[in-house]
Each structure stands twice: as structure tokens, then as C-alpha cells.
Image: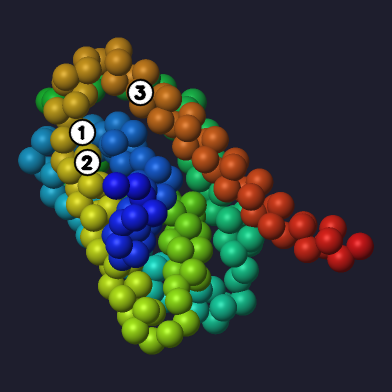
């Protein structure tokens, strides 16, 4: 059975899930999440992972359901969101790319406690690390393609919420097992994957910014 032969709702789910999964890349980000929570034990890290997953669901759900309305209320265009958000993501990736090497140690502790990292759940662990401007802009773009009729609109919104839930469960699974994956790969491989993930995050930020700039400039060029 080809993709075109699948029911419309299944196609919407697969398209939305695949698009957001590719942009968020939860399993790649799990090593950056691990780097940010080295001070915690595995059990404590799972608590933070659950909070991040819940926050990510809320961000994606709001973006999919009411993102365009919120942007319109504040007078923010989608290109502006992409430019500003892309710069934030690129700056975050650049800083992580040039941080000193820190080896993963299950017994490691620092001045960052569980309570401190709980306070960092929404920012920066959820925004911009996990569900950053790229995924928010993508979710808003997906929502803009809903059919105008009421029945189709409601069904599409339900699918959007299911997509947000599925992505959040994937984030939870990836972040909960970040420590296990690091032990499986070993210190050197973990460091390499962390640096690669940071570089990809930098590239994603640059791409989001370029897309925003092109979207903003294109109407000016076409008007000439």
C-alpha cells in the first residue's frame, strides 16, 4: 500500500509526526539533555525528562491549535519568528559546540540540584533546546493547512493533538534513556555524538534564520 492510498487522517498523522520528529530529533538531542543534567542520577533525570516531555506537549499543542492566532495578536509574522528563533537556536548550538569537554560520570554532582534543574524545565530545556522556534514555526505552518469546513477542521485539530502527544512520548523515551545510551556508547562516542548534535543544532538554527530572511525578502523582490 502506497502513502497516497492510506486514509486521509493517517496521512495527516504520519506527515505531522514525521515532520516534527525530523526537526526536533529527540534522540540526537538526548545527549545534549544528558550534558545539561550531568549532576543528576538516572532516577532524577527521569523526573526532569517527564517534566520536559509534558512542557513540550503543551508548547506543541498550543502551537498547533492556536499558534497562528497568538502570533497575529502580537503582530508577529512567521518570518520574524523564524529569524529571531533561528538566531537563538544557532547561538545555543554555538555555545554548546565550544563548551569544555565534560565526561559522563553516573556519580557526578555539581551545584546544580534537582530543584534547580526543575526550574529550568521550560527554559532552556524545553524552549529552545527541545521544542524551539523551528518546531514551533513548523507546527504553526501545519496548523495553517487545516481544511476550512468545521468537521474537517475539528478532525484535523484532533490529529494535531495526537501528533503532539506522540512526539512528546518520543521525547520522554529518548531523554529517560539518555544515561543508558551514554553508557552503551562509552565516553568518547558520547562526546562525539554530543558535539555532532550541537553542530546540527547550529545548522538548524542557521537554516531557520535563512528561511525566515528569504520569506521576508521574497515579497519585496516579487513586487519589483
| Residue drawn at the location 61% of the way across and 77% of the way down | 75
Q: Secondary structure at mark 3?
A: helix
Q: Position of residue 128 (x, y in %)?
A: 42, 51
- The answer for how far apart the CA atoms under marks 1 and 2 are is 5 Å
Q: Count residues near mark 1 (Cα–Cα under 10 Å), then give few for <14, some for 14-19, many for 20+.
A: many
Q: Is residue 102 above or below residue 86?
A: above
Closest to the observer, 146 or 189:
146
Q: Is residue 91 above or below residue 169?
A: above
| Residue drawn at the location 36% of the way across and 50% of the way down | 3
Q: Is residue 7 above or below residue 96?
A: below
Q: Position of residue 108 (x, y in %)?
A: 17, 27
Q: Count residues near mark 3 (Cα–Cα under 10 Å), then give few for <14, some for 14-19, many for 20+.
A: some
Q: Secondary structure at mark 2?
A: helix
Q: Count residues near mark 2 (Cα–Cα under 10 Å), then give few for <14, some for 14-19, many for 20+.
A: many
Closest to the observer, 5 or 51:
5
- The answer for how far apart the CA atoms under marks 1 and 3 are is 12 Å
| Residue drawn at the location 31% of the way across and 41% of the way down | 26
Q: Are marks 1 and 2 in contact (CB under 8 Å)?
A: yes
Residue 111 shows in the view = no
Identify residue for label 3: 193
Residue 31 shows in the view = yes
Judge left or right: residue 123 versus residue 34: right
Which numbered disc flags the more N-terminal residue, 1 or 3? 1
Given the current orientation, which residue lies at the most extreme right position?
224
Q: Quadrant of residue 152?
A: bottom left
Which label is found at residue 178? 1
Which label is found at residue 37? none
Closest to the observer, 11 or 162:
11
Which numbered disc flags the more N-terminal residue, 2 or 3? 2
Judge left or right: residue 28 versus residue 165: right
Amino acid at each position: 500500500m502506497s502513502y497516497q492510498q492510506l486514509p486521509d487522517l493517517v496521512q495527516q498523522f504520519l506527515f505531522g509526526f514525521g515532520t516534527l520528529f525530523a526537526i526536533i530529533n529527540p534522540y540526537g538531542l538526548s545527549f545534549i539533555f544528558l550534558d545539561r543534567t550531568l549532576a543528576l542520577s538516572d532516577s532524577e533525570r527521569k523526573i526532569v525528562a517527564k517534566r520536559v516531555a509534558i512542557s513540550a506537549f503543551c508548547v506543541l499543542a498550543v502551537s498547533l491549535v492556536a499558534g497562528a492566532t497568538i502570533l497575529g495578536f502580537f503582530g508577529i509574522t512567521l518570518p520574524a519568528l523564524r529569524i529571531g528563533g533561528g538566531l537563538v537556536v544557532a547561538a545555543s548550538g554555538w555555545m554548546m559546540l565550544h563548551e569544555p569537554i565534560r565526561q559522563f560520570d553516573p556519580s557526578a554532582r555539581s551545584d546544580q540540584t534537582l530543584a534547580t534543574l526543575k526550574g529550568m524545565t521550560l527554559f532552556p530545556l524545553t524552549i529552545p533546546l527541545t521544542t524551539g522556534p523551528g518546531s514551533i514555526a513548523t507546527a504553526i505552518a501545519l496548523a495553517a493547512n487545516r481544511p476550512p469546513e468545521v468537521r474537517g477542521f475539528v478532525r484535523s485539530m484532533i490529529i494535531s493533538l495526537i501528533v503532539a502527544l506522540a512526539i512528546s512520548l518520543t521525547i520522554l523515551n529518548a531523554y529517560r534513556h539518555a544515561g543508558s545510551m551514554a553508557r552503551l556508547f562509552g565516553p568518547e562516542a558520547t562526546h562525539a555524538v554530543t558535539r555532532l548534535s550541537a553542530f546540527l543544532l547550529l545548522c538548524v538554527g542557521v537554516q531557520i534564520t535563512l528561511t525566515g530572511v528569504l520569506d521576508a525578502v521574497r515579497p519585496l523582490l516579487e513586487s519589483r
